[in-house]
Image (cartoon, grey):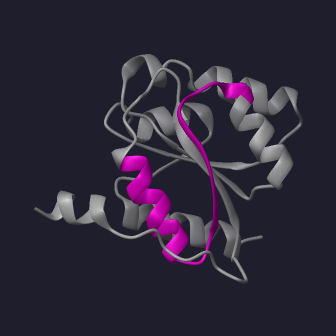
Amino acid sequence: MSWLKSMMEKEPKESENPIGTVVIGNIQPDMHDTAKESVRKALKKAGFKTIDVGKNAKPEAFVAKVKESKADILALSVNTVPAKNNLSALVDALKAANLNVKIIIGGAAVKKEDADAIGAIFGKSKEEGVEIAKKIVAGK
């Protein structure tokens, strides 16, 4: 029942003075957004401004939102192997756009080793993702 409760949870209020900006989404071809939504809401409750790129998003969509928002963090929920295989394309697109943003990844299809391979930080849960995000903005 806890998953049902979290799904029915109201949208957290937008922070008037956000502690940082996080662009969040599922890289294509990943249509599973339950975990992403859980993390997004937890980040929002913690005081972050969140910009949701959505599910099944192309690398270019992430680049555009990071650039437009001047995001501190890019958070990715990766729940399929084909989506995991697109992580390097996203990192290449960020580099091509000269964007230096901290990346946090988590999800059913990734492990710490996958994060290490692209220079990202791995988070096992929404709580850990929020703590990582707080440390990133505190270090700026």
Q: Residue at image x 49%, y 70%?
A: 131
Q: Residue at image x 74%, y 27%?
A: 60
Q: Which residue appears farthest toward the left when viewing the image?
A: 1
Quadrant of the rendered image containing residue 92: top right
Quick check: 27 left or right of 92? Answer: left
Total marks in image: 0
Whole-percent x, y for residue 49 in the image? 66, 67
Q: Residue at image x 49%, y 73%?
A: 12
Q: Is residue 100 visible?
A: no
Quadrant for the N terminus, please. Answer: bottom left
Quadrant of the rendered image containing residue 125: bottom left
Q: Give the range drawn in magenta.
A: 35-60
Whole-percent x, y for residue 118 in the image? 60, 33
Q: Can residue 116 be seen in this view?
A: yes
Compared to residue 78, the image places residue 11 above or below, namely below
Q: Is residue 53 magenta?
A: yes
Compared to residue 80, the image places residue 138 above or below, namely below
Quadrant for the C terminus, please. Answer: bottom right
Quick check: 17 left or right of 110? Answer: right
Quick check: 131 left or right of 88? Answer: left
Q: Residue at image x 85%, y 48%?
A: 68
Residue closest to the eye, 44 or 121? 44
Q: Is residue 31 magenta?
A: no
Quick check: 138 left or right of 111? Answer: right
Whole-percent x, y for residue 66 in the image? 77, 46
Residue closest to the eye, 138 or 57? 57
Q: Which residue appears farthest toward the right when viewing the image?
A: 98
